[in-house]
Structures are given as structure tokens and as C-alpha cells.
Amino acid sequence: MADAQLREILTDAIGYWEPRRLFYNVVLALVVVIYFFVGWPGTKAVLSVDLGLTIFVLAVLANVAYCAAYAVDVFIQFSSFRIVWLRHRWALFLIGLIFAGIITRFFSLGLFGAAV
């Protein structure tokens, strides 16, 4: 019984969070692209392999941070608040997306320096 409940909760969490990961990544990429083009043509001077690798590492770290939602989601789904949580977990996504967007903005300003 417990294994079936765990499997159901994990399947539900994956089914909810993974489709939203694409939107999360697109929003963060848009933040970087916007700040890149806002600083154009000055940002053209900072283009390098190292910048590309740095952005790749930061993108991976942003996706690792996204996984924190799983810990919260699964924990709350095991509580008595599961039914309420399933209707309102979009708020965790929205708060996390805004937070990640703000952090991405700060990193973009740092990466593109005075050009932006």
C-alpha cells in the first residue's frame, strides 16, 4: 500500500513539474537574451567560449534549483493537505519562477557588465 501511494505521489509530481520545466527554462532564457540585446553592441565584445560555458553551467544550476519543488511537493502530498495542495501548487511554481527570474537578471547584469 505504501509503495503504491509513493509511486502515485511521485508520478503525480513528475507529471506536474516536468512539463512546466520547459516554460521555466524559456522564461530564464528570455531574461538573458533581453539583457544581451539591451546592451548591444557592447555585449558583442563579451561573447566568448567562456561566456557560453558559464551560461551553460548557470542553466544547469537553475535546473537543479528547480528540482527543489519536488521536495516541497512530495512532502506536502504526504500530508493531510494533499487535496488543497494539488489545487494551489501553481503558487509555488509562480513564486519559484519569479525568484529564478530575478536571480537570472542579476547574473545577466554581471555577465554582460557595463554593456547593459
Image (cartoon, grey):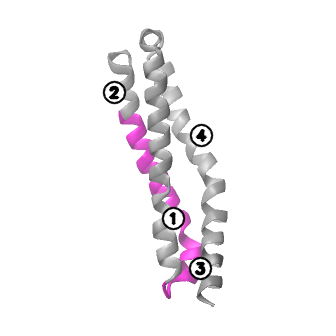
* Residue at the disc numbered 4: 26
Percent from the top left, x then y, of residue 37? 51, 19
Counting residues from the start of the chain, the first of labels 1 and 2 encountered is: 1
Q: Secondary structure at mark 4?
A: helix
Counting residues from the start of the chain, the first of labels 3 and 4 encountered is: 3
Percent from the top left, x then y, of residue 93? 52, 59
- Does the residue at mark 1 contact the one at mark 2 (Cβ under 8 Å)? no
Residue drawn at (46%, 55%), measured in percent from left and top?
Answer: 96
Residues at marks 1 and 2, CA–CA distance in whole angstroms: 29 Å
Residues at marks 3 and 2, CA–CA distance in whole angstroms: 42 Å
- The amino acid type found where label 4 is placed reads Val
Quarter of the figure that contains the C terminus: top left
Residue drawn at (38%, 24%), measured in percent from left and top?
Answer: 111
Tell me, for residue 110, which label it has, or none: 2
* Residue at the disc numbered 1: 70
| Viewer-nearest residue: 84 or 110 | 110
Residue drawn at (53%, 76%), measured in percent from left and top?
Answer: 85
Q: Secondary structure at mark 1?
A: helix
Q: Main secondary structure of the magenta part?
A: helix
Residues at marks 2 and 4, CA–CA distance in whole angstroms: 20 Å
- The amino acid type found where label 1 is placed reads Tyr
